[in-house]
Structure formats: structure tokens, C-alpha cells
């Protein structure tokens, strides 16, 4: 494998570099918010029992062995399902790539330039692989392909020769495209939050093995049982063309991305119809197809309120009208178990009657008021055209507020400064900056 465009920070356009900086800031802020998640805390406690190590988990005093630290960081980032999404590839990149490169830098004493190279590599591999392999029955592609992206990212941070990077990816094949990952969503299990970290943990270890000369199967990509069997794809195909990170959207809502257009349209209607007692019914129109079916069904409390809410358009729109908002505080406070929201969700009807789309797309929402009036709003997928620095700063501050950080504004500035200066930091300065920016928020 040659040193192709899209693998190195120096080869990226300025807008792509800015996107990676924003992705890092977003991920670290989400990890802070993750410390307020009881589910994430349970995962951290479980990883602690496996044994300690030298890698500090951001926003905690927990030190773990590098693979376990990757799983811990990933779980914190993905805890609220608020992390980025590539709308065509349908993957969360940061929950796999950011923990991997930070842990790799920690044990490899790597500098900031190596970290941003690893970020570029990991985002590109995960997004492009997901696009090339396409949807698979039962597979969540973040978990299903995360091991290969993590392997490539970690190996890049360590400066592993190019041919060994391909072996790292090949060794990760055993954790790829597991056909049962989607069951966690179907059952409303919080295990969904952990799956990207487990995949990244596997890939991280694969990279370490490949760095020592262990080889993987040569047909990992196009062989009979590879990721794209019978194709003529090569690893070079993963790095040609435009940088995939350009189409990674930073989520504006803490929810399954398939619900976002409906939420955006509903917010526009909520301004016109703010009183729920004056609304007779809300009707939502989304595309046909199995991808949208999980978020379109009537709301049901199946015993996992966080996942049930985040994968339910009816619940989210009901929360918007009952409480006047849908944001991270909706999920981290008492609203999650509010019976008034659950009852209101019964008056939100979702119809899959828009044309099926291969990518995440827009939605239409209608409100029928008790006085007989009728209003309609349409919205494209929000955030697909990028996130302004102001919007990102607001999101980061909301995450830090949920995490009970004592200095929201100061922490936002620190994270932005870290991301801006990352490529110029030597290894000791990088370690010190991360410790300073991600102080422990756990008691």
C-alpha cells in the first residue's frame, strides 16, 4: 500500500482538517457527558475489574491497559448516541477512531502529528468500507467494520509500514460484520453503546500483532469470505477520491440519526403550535425501508428507557411538545421516565410513505390542531452541510453542563485550543494537554 491521499494530515484540504478538529472536540465533549451515564459508569467499573494499566481514560482517574482504555473511551463517547454520523455510510466514526488514536499515542509516546494522521486514516477507512460493503442484514456497520478502522488508525499512529497496516486490517476480519449487532437495537439494549468499543479494542490488538510481524489473510477484502467477496477491490480503493470525513455530520440531537429530520421539522412546527393541549395529532412522514422502521413504530417502554426513547420518533416529538425541548438534558434528567411524555407519544403517528432512500434523508411533519387548523413543515437531514463553530461550541457546552464540569466556557476553550494545536504538539506536550483538558469528573 502506498502513501495515498486521504491517509495523511498533510494531504488533506483545509476544510477537511477543520472537520477532523471539530470531530475531536465533539468526541471529547461527548466523553465528558458520558461520565454522567449510569450505563457507561457500569462499563467502566467492569473494565476496572479486568485490571489496571498505563492509559488514562479521559475525564476519569481510571488507568487501564490500552485495549480496555479504548473500550472505555468509546463507551463514554457513544453513551448518549450523540456522536457523529456519516449519513451515507451509516457509521459513527469518532467512537471508534478517537479512542484508538489517543490510546495508541499514549503507549507509543506518539506526537500530535501522528495522532491526526491516525484520525484521517481511521475516519477514511471506516466510512469508505461501510459505503463499499453496504447494508447487511443484522449488522450495525460501526461495530461491524470498526475493528478494521481501529487497526488501520492505531498502526498509522505507530508509524507501522504500509504493508503491515494491511495485515493489521486483515487480522481484524474475525470481528467484522457480526450479523447480530443490530439485535441490541431491536431489544432496546444499552449493549449498543459498548459494541463500537469492543470492535475498536479488537482492532487495536490486531494492529499491535501486525506491528510484530503477525500476518492476516490476504483475501480479507475481496476473497471468497472477505468483506466484499468476488469483487476486484483493493486496499488502494479505500483511499482514492475525496476524503470521506467531509460527509461526517456532527449530530445536533442526542438520538438515532434516522430521527433527526423529523425532529428538525417538528421544531419548526412547535414554534407555531407551542401548546400540546391545542394539538390533536402529529403525523410524521419518513422514507420506506427497514432502516427507518426501527424509529417509526409506536413508542413502547421495553425496560430500557434511554434506548427506547432515542430510537422512537413518537417519543422524541412528544418530549418536544410536552417539555418544550429535546436535547441532552431531556435524556439525562427526569423527563426520560415522565409518563406524560409516554402518553403524548400515542398521538404522534409515523408513516413510512416517502420514497425509500439509500442514504439518510429528510422528513415531513404535519400538525392537526384542536381548532381544526393544519400545518406542515419539511426538513432535510440537519447538520449534513456542516456544523458552525458557534453550534459546536453550544453543543460542547451542553455536554459539559450535563457532566457537571465546574467551568463550561473554560473547558470549551481548552478543547478548541487542543484541537487547533494538536499537529504541532510533541509527545510529552500532547499527554500534558490531554490531562489538563480532560480532568476527572467522577467522584
Image (spheres, rainbow, N blue to C red):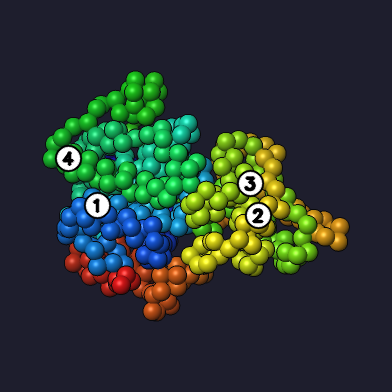
Give the camera-side residue of 263 and 124.
263
Percent x, y of residue 323: 63, 67
* 329 versus 177 height, above or below: below
Q: Is disc 4 placed on a helix, strand or loop?
A: helix
- Please indicate whether residue 187 sits to the left or right of residue 275 in the image: left
Callout 1 crowding tier (Cα within 10 Å): few <14, some 14–19, many ≥20:
many
Q: Is disc 1 placed on a helix, strand or loop?
A: helix
Residue in view at x 82 percent, y 60 percent: 370
Residue in view at x 30 percent, y 33 percent: 173
Give the camera-side residue of 269 and 277.
277
Q: Is disc 2 placed on a helix, strand or loop?
A: helix
Residue at the left extreme, as displayed: 212
Q: Is disc 3 placed on a helix, strand or loop?
A: loop
**How far apart are the two marked residues, 1 and 3, measured between alpha carbons?**
37 Å
For mark 1, what is the residue? Answer: 68
Q: Do the residues labelled 4 and 1 touch (CB within 8 Å)?
A: no
Q: Earlier in the sequence, mark 4 or mark 1?
A: 1
- Name the image quarter holding residue 405: bottom left
For mark 2, what is the residue? Answer: 345
Q: Which of marks 1 and 3 is nearer the N terminus?
A: 1
Inspect this view and state whether residue 148 appears. Answer: yes
Q: Which of marks 4 and 2 is nearer the N terminus?
A: 4
Residue in view at x 63 percent, y 46 percent: 298
Callout 2 crowding tier (Cα within 10 Å): few <14, some 14–19, many ≥20:
many
* 413 versus 259 height, above or below: below
**How far apart are the two marked residues, 2 and 1, measured between alpha carbons?**
39 Å
For mark 3, what is the residue? Answer: 298
Inspect this view and state whether residue 251 appears. Answer: no
**How far apart are the two marked residues, 4 and 3, measured between alpha carbons?**
47 Å
For mark 4, what is the residue? Answer: 209
Q: Do the residues labelled 4 and 3 touch (CB within 8 Å)?
A: no
Amino acid at each position: 500500500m502506498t502513501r495515498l491521499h486521504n491517509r495523511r494530515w498533510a494531504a488533506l484540504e483545509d476544510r477537511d482538517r477543520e472537520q477532523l478538529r471539530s470531530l475531536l472536540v465533539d468526541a471529547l465533549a461527548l466523553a465528558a457527558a458520558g461520565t454522567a451515564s449510569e450505563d457507561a459508569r457500569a462499563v467502566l467499573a467492569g473494565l476496572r475489574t479486568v485490571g489496571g494499566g498505563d492509559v488514562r481514560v479521559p475525564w476519569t482517574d481510571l488507568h487501564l491497559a490500552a485495549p480496555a482504555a479504548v473500550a472505555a473511551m468509546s463507551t463514554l463517547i457513544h453513551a448518549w448516541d450523540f456522536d457523529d454520523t456519516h449519513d451515507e455510510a451509516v457509521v459513527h466514526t469518532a467512537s471508534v477512531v478517537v479512542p484508538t488514536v489517543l490510546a495508541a499515542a499514549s503507549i507509543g509516546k506518539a506526537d500530535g502529528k501522528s495522532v491526526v494522521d491516525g484520525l484521517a486514516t481511521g475516519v477514511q477507512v471506516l466510512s469508505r468500507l461501510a459505503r463499499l460493503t453496504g447494508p447487511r442484514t443484522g449488522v450495525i456497520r460501526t461495530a461491524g467494520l470498526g475493528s478494521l478502522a481501529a487497526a488501520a488508525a492505531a498502526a498509522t499512529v505507530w508509524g507501522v509500514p504500509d504493508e503491515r497496516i494491511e495485515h493489521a486490517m486483515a487480522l481484524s476480519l474475525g470481528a467484522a460484520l457480526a450479523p447480530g449487532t443490530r439485535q441490541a437495537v431491536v431489544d432496546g439494549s444499552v449493549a449498543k453503546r459498548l459494541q463500537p468499543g469492543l470492535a475498536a479494542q479488537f482492532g487495536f490488538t490486531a494492529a499491535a500483532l501486525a506491528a510484530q510481524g503477525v500476518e492476516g489473510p490476504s483475501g480479507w477484502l475481496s476473497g471468497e469470505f472477505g468483506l466484499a467477496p468476488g469483487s476486484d477491490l483493493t486496499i488502494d480503493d479505500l483511499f482514492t477520491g475525496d476524503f470521506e470525513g467531509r460527509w461526517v455530520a456532527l449530530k445536533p440531537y442526542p438520538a438515532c440519526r434516522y430521527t433527526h429530520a423529523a425532529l428538525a421539522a417538528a421544531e419548526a412546527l412547535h414554534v407555531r403550535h407551542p401548546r400540546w393541549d391545542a394539538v390533536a395529532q402529529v403525523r410524521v412522514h419518513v422514507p420506506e425501508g427497514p432502516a427507518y422502521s426501527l424509529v417509526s413504530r409506536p413508542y413502547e417502554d421495553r425496560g430500557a428507557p434511554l434506548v427506547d426513547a432515542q430510537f422512537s420518533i413518537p417519543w422524541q416529538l412528544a418530549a418536544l411538545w410536552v417539555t418544550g425541548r429535546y436535547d441532552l438534558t431531556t435524556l439525562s434528567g427526569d423527563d426520560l421516565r415522565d409518563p406524560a411524555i409516554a402518553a403524548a407519544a400515542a398521538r404522534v403517528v409515523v408513516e413510512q410513505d416517502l420514497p425509500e432512500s439509500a442514504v439518510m434523508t429528510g422528513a415531513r411533519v404535519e400538525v392537526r390542531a384542536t381548532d381544526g387548523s393544519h400545518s406542515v413543515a419539511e426538513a432535510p437531514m440537519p447538520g449534513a452541510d456542516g456544523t458552525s463553530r458557534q453550534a459546536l461550541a453550544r453543543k460542547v457546552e451542553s455536554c459539559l453542563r450535563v457532566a457537571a464540569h465546574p467551568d463550561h466556557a473554560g473547558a470549551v476553550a481548552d478543547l478548541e485550543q487542543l484541537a487547533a494545536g494538536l499537529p504541532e504538539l510533541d509527545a510529552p506536550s500532547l499527554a500534558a494537554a490531554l490531562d489538563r483538558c480532560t480532568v476527572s469528573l467522577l467522584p
